[in-house]
Image (cartoon, rainbow, N blue to C red):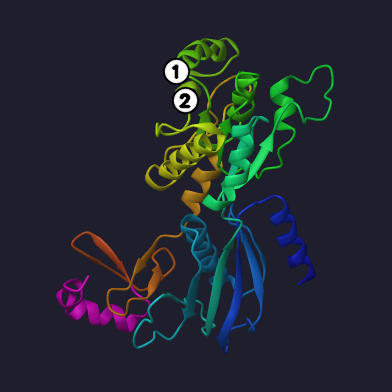
Amino acid sequence: MDNLRETAKSLDERAEPYVMVTVVRRKRPSSATVGDKAIVTADGEMKGFVGGHCTRDLVIGQAQECLRTGESKLVLVTSQPPGRVEEDVTVLSMTCASEGTVELFLEPKNMDPPLIIVGTSPIALALEEWAPRFALAPLRISLEEAAPGGVADEPPTRLRNQLDLHTGTAAYGVVATMGVYDVDGLLALSALPLRYLGLVTSPKRWTAMRTDLTAAGASSEFIDFVTAPAGFDIGALGPQEIALSILAQIVERRRRHAQVRWRGQSAEGHPEPDEAADSRELAAPRQVIDPVCGMTVDLEKSPHRLVLDGTIYGFCCAGCRDRFARDPEAYLSHA
């Protein structure tokens, strides 16, 4: 348990998302005990113990779903399908020969995405102050506050050295240096995965800056990703109102355009492939709902399957499969 606490502390310090899994109920012959805990990281690694191999695979899949939605959930893994599925409980089929039942509480942690703010301007300070109210974790960096760098350290490097981010965490970014080192600020963030990047500037200055960014090695894809001027046009006056207009734009991007993102740029200016995301997607279990009892079933692992009109249906047990086979329309009509 001490090792698990140290793992959680380390993840918290890096603001890296993870899911804390706790056993809240068990029924023999499950190997878990009430109070057992485990941590599932964003890349699908589990540390701790909440059950055997079959339970482990199911929990990792459900934990990754928690990280996608940001919501906690109760998960029941059982070899004995309940008569009815309780509301707000995800029921999964225990396919191991050892059988048993275990109920788990999954709680996502560190789900507030980072908002990286570049600069010391009043707008930058206002963004830092307001960000937590919008479920954003502010991280402000600046050349003025950067540690002295070596002779070869370029300004973008000195800015990035102030960050301690999990490499897979897609952040939001705003450059608000008021023209002092805007290009350096944008280049510093171009290497990171981003959901939004805004620049506090005027339309006329942004037109000129696009040429400067190209000359500095930024790709056209990155330049097009930048939102400039940042913020909605609400007639804002003063740093607080301008910061509010930018935060409103970030909220809109977060809620309505969640898939729009920048994956990060290599030193040569090319977009980085999202290999980690691709591997997570490939590793994700294919889960379906048993049309008879409503349990969630891992289609790739359940031996109880049936093909009807080209569709593969998964079942928690042979009984549900056989009932469906006798009268599929009775169950499909309620789907």
Q: Is residue 327 above or below residue 177?
A: below
Q: Split into 4 quadrants, where in the image is the N terminus? A: bottom right
The spot of residue 227 in percent (x, y) is: 46, 28
Marks 1 and 2 in Cβ contact (< 8 Å): yes
145 part of magenta stretch = no
Residue at image location 29% in from the left, 78% down from the top: 321
Camera-side residue of 176 and 75: 176
First-in-chain label (1 vs 2): 1
Mark-to-mark CA distance, 1 and 2: 6 Å
**203 left or right of 165 in image:** left
Q: Is residue 12 above or below residue 117?
A: below
Residue beneath label 1, please?
Answer: 203
Q: Give the residues in magenta.
A: 315-335
The spot of residue 296 in percent (x, y) is: 39, 71
Query: What kind of residue is marked 2?
Result: Pro
Can the viewer see residue 258?
A: no
Residue at image location 47% in from the left, 81% down from the top: 78
330 part of magenta stretch = yes
Q: Which mark is residue 239?
A: none
Query: What kind of residue is marked 1?
Result: Pro
Residue beneath label 2, please?
Answer: 229
Q: Magenta region, mostly helix, strand or loop? A: helix
Q: Is residue 258 above or below residue 47?
A: above
Which image quadrant is residue 80 in? Answer: bottom left
Camera-side residue of 103 and 170: 170
